[in-house]
Structure formats: structure tokens, C-alpha cells
């Protein structure tokens, strides 16, 4: 079977270990029967570990119960850059191998329920583990928002980044993040409400800055260039600037210049929220490998979005997304019988 899952960006500033957004870079996994284990990989991370140690192979073997499998991985997701590559890979591999519980498999394998939930469900999700089970809730996300991602050419270990965090936090810092989380969810639902303060955080970003000392300067460049909010992606080192879709191409160029000025090699990607989550079958197939060894992005077909009657647009910030996605979100129960 073939399956595809999207990348995800977690935390998004104050939403530490609770909030994640699926974005339009993907990993495709195909699992077939074979006389022995065969692992092939293309695109991001190609050839790094094409054996039984590959995460997709480990997940598939665990699901099927033996290693007589051919596992093919094709990825657009940068590895160890804070874009949820492990969660997406685990989710896609689990489904391709026949698992009926991809969320549980991905969350257990990756250790982060929010990344796994975003890759399985798609869109913006909050997720937590409740009584041993991952409980995700899909939240509203404004389709007029795009994300400019600065992706440095340096990996950053999530384990190492987590070791820098304090084991306890003060009440003032906890309440600060709760307030900013509220601002963030409101702004991601309607970009007219998104303010730069919504990306502020006192639980993880500053503690991790020694691993990426250029981060504060680059985040400031994103905000100065037109981002409504800027933050780390996961544990980094990828940095994100959220902006209105019309601002995206200009901010993309500003981000490239800022990275060059800071002496940080890497690339800049213009990303969109991905609402589909896991996809199986022929629809999961990614484009062919390009000459440079990468897998090109899937072409986007933009549909016109009109505000509902009686909901005015705010000058300079575009029409309201209300009516595109209902407020209140969707609660998913993965224990519900089919």
C-alpha cells in the first residue's frame, strides 16, 4: 500500500507540546511484500539509512510482524529541521503497512502527540495525551495565511534542544504563555487578529537560542519584513513567519536576504497549511524526482475565497475567513467503532 503524510510545525511560539500545523511538504511511503527486507529512499534524507534501521522500515516491520518487505520512501520534508519529519514518516509508514491506528503509532514513535495529530488529521490541531490516548482537536485556520520558512543547512537534535529546558517554570511564565496561546489561536483563525505578540513564548524558544544564536535576529527580520507573527518551528532550527497570502512572495525574498546577511546557509520555503492529512492509494503519489535530487512541491490550485454576506473585510488585511471553516473545531475520537 502507498500512503502520504504532511510535514508539521509544532509549538508555534507559546503552544509548547500542544499545538501543531500541517504544511504542504510531504513524505510518501510504499510497503510491499518481498522475499527479504529492501529499503529505498529518494528526496530529503535519501541514502542516510537504507536498511533495517530506517524509521519507516522499523515501523512497517512492527506493524506487519516480519521483515519480508520492500519499503520505499520519497520525501519533501527536511530531516532534523523542526518540521515533523519523523512523525509524518511514522504515520505514513504505519498506514502503508496496514495499521488501523496511525495516530497512536506515530505519537508513540515520535514522542510528540501534536506533530503526529497534524500529520494524520491535517490542518491546525491541539493535541494532548489523555488517559494514555492521544486526543486531538482540529482548530480553525485562516486560508489567507501563508508561512515563510527559513530552513538552515544545519540539523538540530530535538533531544538536545529539550535538554536545555528547565524542569520547572514559574507561575508568571506559565500564565504568560496561556495568554499568548489565546492570542495565537484567535489570530490563526482570522489573520486580521494576528499580532506579533501572539508568537511570544517563555517556555522554550529563549532557552534553545544558544543552539541557534542567529535566531533572534532572523525572527526580527521576518517581523520587519511584513510577518504578522514569527516563531520557531518545533525545536528548530527552522523559523517561521506567518503573513497574509499577498505578502508571502515579498517576505520570501526578504527572508533569503536576511539569511545571507546573517551568514546562515540554507533555503527559504513558502508554505501553506495542508488540510488533507493522511492520503492513501494513487492520490498519495508525489511528483517524480527532479534532476537536482529533490522532489518538487505539489502544484497548488487556489480557489477563490469570498467572505460571507454581512462580514466586512478589514482594510489591508483581506476578507474574513469566516464561513470557510467553522469555529469551534472538530473533536476526533479514534476509539469510535467503524
Image (tube, grey):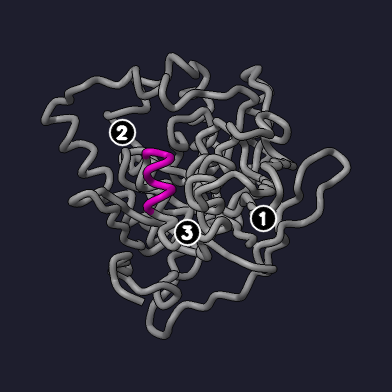
Q: Which residues are magenta?
A: 104-111
Sequence order check, earlier mark of 2 and 3? 3
Identify the residue at horizontal 68%, vertical 63% (top origin).
300
Q: Residues within 10 Å of mark 3 (few under 14, many from 20)?
A: some
Residue at the outermost left position = 171
- Position above or below: 243 against 47: below
Mark on residue 248?
A: none
Quadrant in the picture for the C terminus: bottom left
The residue that mark 2 highlights is 201
- List the residue tagged with mark 3: 99
The residue that mark 1 highlights is 33
State if disc 1 and disc 2 touch (CB < 8 Å). no
Q: Where residue 137 sits: x, y (%)?
A: 31, 61
Name which quarter of the figure residue 101 lies in.
Answer: bottom left
Residue under the point 64% across and 47% down: 68
Residue 65 lies, in percent from the top left, at 50, 49
User: Pointers 2 and 3 in contact (CB under 8 A)?
Assistant: no
**Residue 23: within the magenta?**
no
Q: Where's the N terminus, which quadrant?
A: bottom right
The one of 101 and 268 positioned closer to us in this rendering = 101
Amino acid at each position: 500500500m502507498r500512503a502520504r503524510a504532511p510535514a508539521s510545525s509544532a509549538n508555534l511560539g507559546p503552544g509548547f507540546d500542544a499545538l501543531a500545523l500541517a504544511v504542504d511538504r510531504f513524505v510518501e511511503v510504499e510497503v510491499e511484500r518481498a522475499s527479504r527486507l529492501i529499503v529505498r529512499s529518494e528526496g530529503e534524507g535519501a541514502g542516510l539509512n537504507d536498511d533495517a534501521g530506517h524509521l519507516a522500515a522499523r515501523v512497517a516491520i512492527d506493524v506487519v510482524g516480519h521483515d519480508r518487505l520492500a519499503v520505499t520512501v520519497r520525501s519533501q520534508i527536511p530531516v532534523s529541521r523542526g518540521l515533523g519529519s519523523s512523525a509524518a514518516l511514522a504515520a505514513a509508514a504505519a498506514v502503508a503497512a496496514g495499521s488501523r491506528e496511525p495516530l497512536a503509532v506515530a505519537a508513540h514513535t515520535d514522542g510528540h502527540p501534536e506533530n503526529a495529530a497534524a500529520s494524520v488529521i491535517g490542518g491546525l490541531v491541539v493535541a494532548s495525551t489523555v488517559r494514555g490516548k492521544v486526543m486531538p482537536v482540529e482548530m480553525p485556520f485562516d486560508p489567507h495565511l501563508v508561512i515563510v520558512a527559513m530552513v538552515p543547512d544545519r540539523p538540530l537534535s530535538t533531544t538536545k534542544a529539550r535538554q536545555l529546558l528547565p524542569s520547572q517554570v514559574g507561575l508568571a511564565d506559565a500564565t504568560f504563555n496561556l495568554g499568548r496561546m489565546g492570542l495565537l489561536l484567535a489570530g490563526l483563525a482570522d489573520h486580521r487578529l494576528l499580532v506579533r505578540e501572539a508568537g511570544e513564548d517563555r517556555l522554550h524558544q529563549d532557552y534553545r537560542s544558544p543552539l541557534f544564536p542567529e535566531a533572534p535576529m532572523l525572527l526580527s527580520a521576518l517581523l520587519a519584513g511584513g510577518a504578522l507573527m514569527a516563531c520557531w518551528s518545533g525545536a528548530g532550527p527552522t523559523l517561521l513567519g506567518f503573513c497574509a497570502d499577498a505578502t508571502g512572495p515579498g517576505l520570501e525574498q526578504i527572508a533569503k536576504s536576511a539569511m545571507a546577511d546573517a551568514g546562515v546557509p540554507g533555503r527559504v520555503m513558502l508554505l501553506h497549511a495542508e488540510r488533507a492529512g493522511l492520503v492513501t492509494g494513487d492520490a498519495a503519489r508525489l511528483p517524480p524526482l527532479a534532476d537536482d535530487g529533490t522532489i518538487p512541491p505539489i502544484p497548488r490550485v487556489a480557489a477563490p475565497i469570498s467572505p460571507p454576506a454581512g462580514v466586512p473585510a478589514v482594510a489591508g488585511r483581506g476578507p474574513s475567513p469566516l464561513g470557510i471553516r467553522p469555529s469551534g473545531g472538530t473533536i476526533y475520537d479514534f476509539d469510535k467503532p467503524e
